Amino acid sequence: MISNNNLNESIRKTILHNPTDKLRELFHKRINKYKNDIEKFFGVSLLKGTDIQILEYKEGGHYNCHADNASVIMKNNHIVGYKVVRSERKLTTLLFLNEDFLGGEIEFCHLRYYNNKRVILKPKIGMMIVFPSHGLFAHKVFEVKKGKRFAIVKWWDVI
Ligand SMILES: O=C(O)CCC(=O)C(=O)O
Ligand SMILES: [Fe+2]
C-alpha cells in the first residue's frame, strides 16, 4: 500500500497499491489488443503514459466528481468549473478487476444519454473504459456498500 492518508477523504476514500509486474502485464495486454481501435476512435496516437495505479475501494470507499487533468472549482458546494493542472493527461484508461461488490458504480457527472438518463456504469470484471481526461468527462464513483472494488487506472499523453 502506498497511501491513503494524504488524500482528503471527503473527496476520495481509496487505497492506492503498488503496481506489480503481473498487473502491468495484464493491463498492457488489454491495451495492446485495443490500441489501434482507441487511436482510431479518438483520432490520436497513444504516446507515453503514467505507470498504472491500482485502486482499492473498501466498504465506504468512494470518489467524488472530478476530472483527471484538473482540480475542481467549487462554489456553494457545487462544481462550477475545472482548473487544468495536469495538462499532459489526455486520455484515461480504466480496467475493472472485479464485480463482486455492491455500489461502486461510475457516473460521468456531466453527461446524459439522448433520453436524458444519467450515464452510470456498473463495473464488470475485465471491462475497460477509455475517455478524455478533461472536465466534460468528469466522473465519480459511488460508495461501495458491500465488498471491495478494484480497478487499474492509467493516463496517457497523446498527439
Ligand atoms: O475507480 C474508478 O473507477 C475511477 C478512478 C478514478 O477516477 C481516478 O483514479 O481518477
Ligand atoms: Fe478519475
Image (cartoon, grey):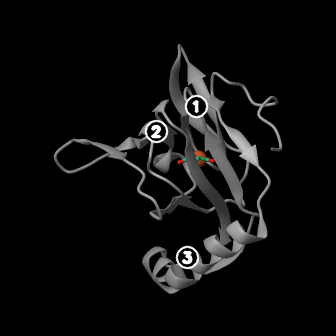
Q: State the mark number for residue 104.
A: 2
Looking at the image, which residue is at 66% across and 61% down? 155
Label 2 CB sits under 8 Å from any ligand 1 atom: yes
Q: Is 119 left or right of 136, judged from the image as shown?
A: left
Is 67 drawn above or below residue 76 in the view shown? below
Counting from the top left corner in percent of width and height, residue 17 is at 75, 49
Front-most of residues 101 and 85? 101
Q: State the mark number for residue 51.
A: none
Return the residue at label 1: 61
Q: Is 120 left or right of 51, judged from the image as shown?
A: left
Return the residue at label 3: 30
| Quarter of the image with the N terminus in it | top right
Which mark sits nearer the N-terminus, 3 or 1?
3
> Are the residues at dot 2 and dot 1 in contact (C-beta closer than 8 Å)?
yes
Tell me where residue 111 sits by quadrant.
Answer: top left
Disc 2 from disc 1: Cα separation: 8 Å
Is 65 drawn above or below residue 137 in the view shown? above
